Image (cartoon, rainbow, N blue to C red):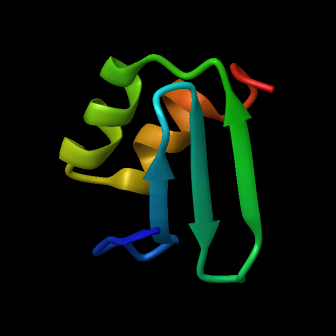
Amino acid sequence: MIPVESSSIRAVDYDGHHLFVQFHTSDIYVHYGVPYAVFAGLMEAASMGAYYNRFIRGRFR
């Protein structure tokens, strides 16, 4: 997992198809079929939590 600076997300990881997101609550979510562009957008977002909610949450299993 890659530690990140975010008020809601503690760490992320990506293996080419799966996005792993660990929140500060210690919950880890795995999202399937995530394109690299979405992962890259998350890593570059000014607000990772807002990006996650807008572009990832509810869009990928």
Residue 7 in percent (x, y) is at 42, 76
Q: Is residue 36 left or right of residue 55?
A: left
**Vertical placement of 24 versus 1: above or below?**
below
Residue plotted at (34% across, 41% down): 42
**Vertical placement of 18 versus 34: above or below?**
below
Residue that sits furthest to the bottom in the current view: 25
Q: Quadrant of the C terminus?
A: top right
Residue 9 in percent (x, y) is at 50, 68
Residue that sits furthest to the front in the current view: 15
How many numbered dots are placed on residues in this image?
0
Residue plotted at (69% across, 19% down): 59
Q: Is residue 48 left or right of residue 54?
A: left
**Vertical placement of 48 versus 52: above or below?**
below
Front-most of residues 16 and 7: 16
**Vertical placement of 55 versus 24: above or below?**
above
Front-most of residues 58 and 60: 60
Residue 35 in percent (x, y) is at 45, 17
Residue 21 in percent (x, y) is at 59, 57
Residue 4 appears in which quarter of the rendering? bottom left
Residue 39 appears in which quarter of the rendering? top left
Residue plotted at (64% across, 18% down): 33
